[in-house]
Image (cartoon, rainbow, N blue to C red):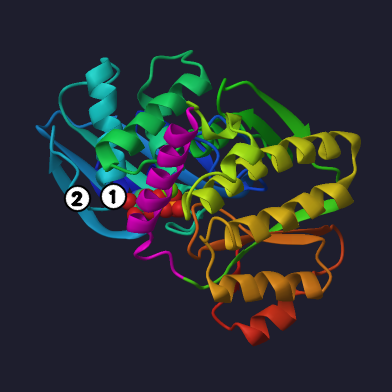
Amino acid sequence: MESQFAAQFGHAPTVQTTVPGRVNLLGEWTDFSGGLVLPMAVPLHVRLALAPNGRDHDRVASAQFDGVVTRPVGKAASGHWSDYVAGALAHARAQGWADPQGYDVALDSTVPHGSGLSSSAAVIVGMLRMLAPEGTPAPDTAVAARAVENEYIGVPCGIMDQMAVAIAAPGDVLALDTGTLAFEAVPLPPAWRVSIVHSGVSRKLADGRYKERRDEILAAAEQLGVADLCRADLAAVETLPAPLRARARHVVSEDIRTRAALAHLKTGDIAAFGAAMRDGQRSISTDFAITTPEVDAQVALIERHGALAARQTGGGFGGCIVVLDHAGDEPGWWEPLHSAFPAARRIV
Ligand code: ADP
Ligand code: MG
């Protein structure tokens, strides 16, 4: 990272950091409704380095994107890949964490972007961690990173991704209550393995549908008279009109399911945990309608070939599938999956 930075900008970075991506095992689309979520860090990382440059513009270089981008300090989001870095810089300047003058920033990453593994949160959390005053608690950095994604980028995400990449330790499930931000780390028993497959189904054009789902959740909460949809009860949900009824049924049942799954994880009942993941997949496929027929077919194939559970992870409409099965042997589902769906690729 240091040599990449020096080659790019002709001086050394003053600070560097590394942030993992995350995968969500359960608790999908509940993280702005006060739900419990169960993400894990993935062994893939975004590496970042920066230094002030004394100019009136920022310069951003990424090993994953072409060119060195020059952005005047204070420029708004423009739909460019460098917006995530610029948004973090804008937030840090507004907080008094960063100089009003420019910065040089270099990035390199093994987290595939746009795949549901939260490269965006990793980039923003990494930037803010480098800029925030020493001793800033990780949850504060995560909350600030969410604000950047919501306000500067305009993505109406909850707090899960930022908290997960800021806090989760390898091998642990981060049980995070998104209502209170209380969290605990629960180790996944070593006999079990989490794999990640990219379905090959691109999430392009997903943005409009994310907003539609979010609006449906907010409308359902309003009609039920609850601040957080996870606090509604299932019987009340059934009185809603379509499609809000099915959308709310997903959110409320997902939270109940996730709380039960956490209890199973703590007692080591991984079979029951896997069953909850399978139910979660059915719920996002039918009630929440954020999978695609191809992703559903891949999930079914993976389970047919011996995995305990598989489900689409992240915001939806394609991207990655998370798989839970026995550690040790090569997974028996990979070859059949790859021959039936050549665009699928193993990430972890
Ligand atoms: P994800 O599911 O990976 O979070 P998003 O669409 O939310 O997908 O965020 C992807 C965006 O994050 C990229 O388009 C880019 O703007 C930024 N990003 C991610 N990884 C990098 C990287 N290595 N270098 C520069 N920007 C990155
Ligand atoms: Mg993202």
Residue 210 covered by magenta stretch: yes
Residue drawn at x 65%, y 86% is 340
| Prevailing SS of the magenta stretch | helix
Q: Nearer the viewer, residue 126 or 199?
A: 199
- Residue 35: x and y, percent? 59, 33
Residue 263 covered by magenta stretch: no
Separation of disc 1 and disc 2 at Cα?
A: 6 Å
Mark 2 surroundings within 10 Å by alpha-carbon count, few (fewer than 14), some (14 through 19), many (20 or more) = some
Quarter of the image for residue 297 reads: bottom right
**Residue 48 vs residue 208: left or right?**
right
**Magenta segment range?**
202-225
Q: Nearer the viewer, residue 2 or 317?
A: 317
Can residue 63 be seen in this snapshot?
Answer: no
- Residue 302: x and y, percent? 73, 72
Mark 1 surroundings within 10 Å by alpha-carbon count, few (fewer than 14), some (14 through 19), many (20 or more) = many
- Badge 2 marks a residue whose secondary structure is strand
User: Which amino acid type corresponds to the residue marked 2 in the rendered image?
Assistant: Val
Residue drawn at x 43%, y 57% is 113
Q: Which mark is residue 69?
A: 2
The quarter in which the C terminus is drawn is bottom right
